[in-house]
Image (spheres, rainbow, N blue to C red):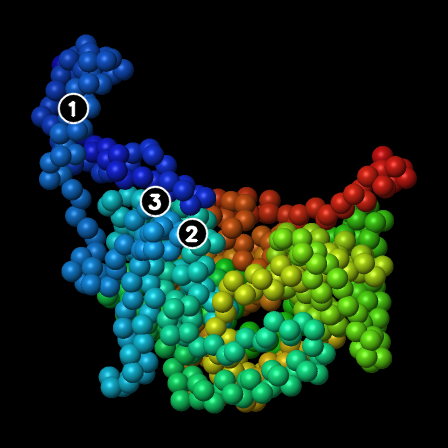
Amino acid sequence: MRKINVYIFRLDPLLTSPLPGGGTSPLPSVTAPCVTLPSASMQSWQGEGWGGVRFSKIFFILVLAMSLTACNPQSNKNESTENSILKPCPGFSETGYPPLVDGAECGELLVNENPDNPQSKKISLNILRLPAISPVAEKDPLFLIQGGPGGSSVEMAKQIHYVFWDVRKNRDLIFVDQRGTGKSNPLKCKKPPEAVNDWKEMQKREWMDTEIQRCADEFRASSAFYTTPYAVRDLDLVRQALGYESINLWGGSYGTRVAMEYARQFPANLRSMVLDGVAPVELALPDYFARDAMQSLTKINEHCLQDVNCALLYGNMLEKIAVILKRLERAESEEKPITIEYPDPRHDQTKTMILNAREFSMLIFSALYSRDLAALLPKIISDAEKEDYQLLASLNDLATKSFANLEISDAMRYSVVCNEDRSLSTSSESSATFLEYNFVEEMDRVCSRWPKTELTADFYHPLKTDIPALLLSGGFDPVTPVFWAEKVNKKFGHSLSLQAPGGHHIVSTEGCVPQLIAQFYERASTKDLKVDCVQNILPLPMDLGANRENKKQEGVEK
């Protein structure tokens, strides 16, 4: 008889597996082999039958016995170090919300505000770890970096952790609030009062100028330490504190800049990186916003005009936008602002909004970030051209609430943009406008008051690296189109740049991209990735609403 080895796996019913939506599955987790039994006769196993009752009972007893013994996998991390800063996250009884996943750990790491001065004040870095599902996780976790600048990576975890479900099967996910954001000593200016929506544009500008000056004075002594190079030094301190020898990075938007700077400063500690919505320093925020946003809006308009139903229902969006802007500018000049009463989209209570040309332009710009909202733009603009602003007002309400939920630390944002980007502003594009809104002029109003600091020359040199990298872009991205990814990719030795034709800003959540990301991190290589599926991420059909039925009745659709 041929002899075989029989492997026993411990099935631990206490290890529940998180589901993509944030819940948990009661299915048991399977660990790596713990022990090999002496050889057994194939005939003896066959005699009992692989599906037989007797074998099932014996196997269950063996499994139960193994679960009660010392057959436990060794941790890959430095337990004594990590236990000093990470503890189980507060549960439902403390926060009113369950942890994102079973076993989620929270903590903080104290660092010097000025890393080059041990006597400088201490600030805390807020950390969240979502442990790998496998109890024998890979030794190189994935650190995920929020964009902004000014966004909280820990808050971002609530929205995107499920996207990295496949990655978390074998790797810890680490979220660190960048210094100056979230709960890592956030730098924030005062928020405008609730009555701001009722103010005239001049009142808003006067309030903003006064507050920016006050805020700049408040952070004058410390803002220099909240730029990107200091942030990546923090990331590496967190890596060390958690006992990881090397890490992987995912960065979105401005987070890609942080990831690339980490690759520059600590290449030996970085295994691979995914850059989604690539934003190198050369982007010189916001010099190219007007050009890139107009390109995105034009493509959406063309997409609508190529659809016979969309073209007949809504016509040329750009022509209608011009009509709307003239009407709004005339209303402002005559000091007869357009006031809109609309039902709050969340609780249906009546609210009021004053619409001007600036607000209108910014609403269109913000909608370009989203694949879903972009599909509504033809209807939103067509309704507004007919002086029906209800959908536009609802969009404004949702956008305002969504932005507030992001809790952007604006003073940190200004410290980054005013020092890293505005010093590079030499492009002819800087005078361009998007629907008559000048991004550069608005930012320079802030930066003219904000404290300045100098960065080292190498910070501005394009990154050259052989670290495996996957670069992602959306075909309709209004701020980081594929042009920037391709520019960066030319300097990378082992990388691949992919564009999702129908994607907007950040495509890691779209179609097959989450699976591609997981495969890339597993291999730390773009070789043999099956990427054809990315071409199936197409623009969403334009929303035709009830008008589709009207056109059917008129014989437009056959």
Q: CA distance from mark 3 to mark 2?
A: 12 Å
Q: Disc 2, disc 1: CB below 8 Å?
A: no
Q: Which mark is residue 161?
A: 2
> Type of residue at label 1?
Ile
Callout 2: 10 Å neighbours few (<14), some, many (20+)?
many
Apparent side of residue 90 relative to residue 416 in the rendered image (left or right):
left
Please, which residue is most extreme toward the left here? 38
Task: Give whichever of 251, 264 is nearer the camera.
Answer: 251
Which of marks 1 and 3 precedes in the sequence?
1
According to the image, label 1 marks what residue? 61
- Residue at 75 percent of width and 62 percent of height: 341
According to the image, label 3 marks what residue? 169
Apparent side of residue 466 relative to residue 205 in the rendered image (left or right):
left
Task: Give whichever of 114, 506 is nearer the camera.
Answer: 114
> Type of residue at label 2?
His
For the question of whether residue 477 can be seen, the reply is no
Which of marks 2 and 3 precedes in the sequence?
2
> Type of residue at label 3?
Lys
Task: Give whichever of 500, 381 is nearer the camera.
Answer: 381
- Residue at 71 percent of width and 65 percent of height: 352
Callout 1: 10 Å neighbours few (<14), some, many (20+)?
few
Q: Given this view, does label 3 or label 1 mark the residue nearer the observer? A: 1
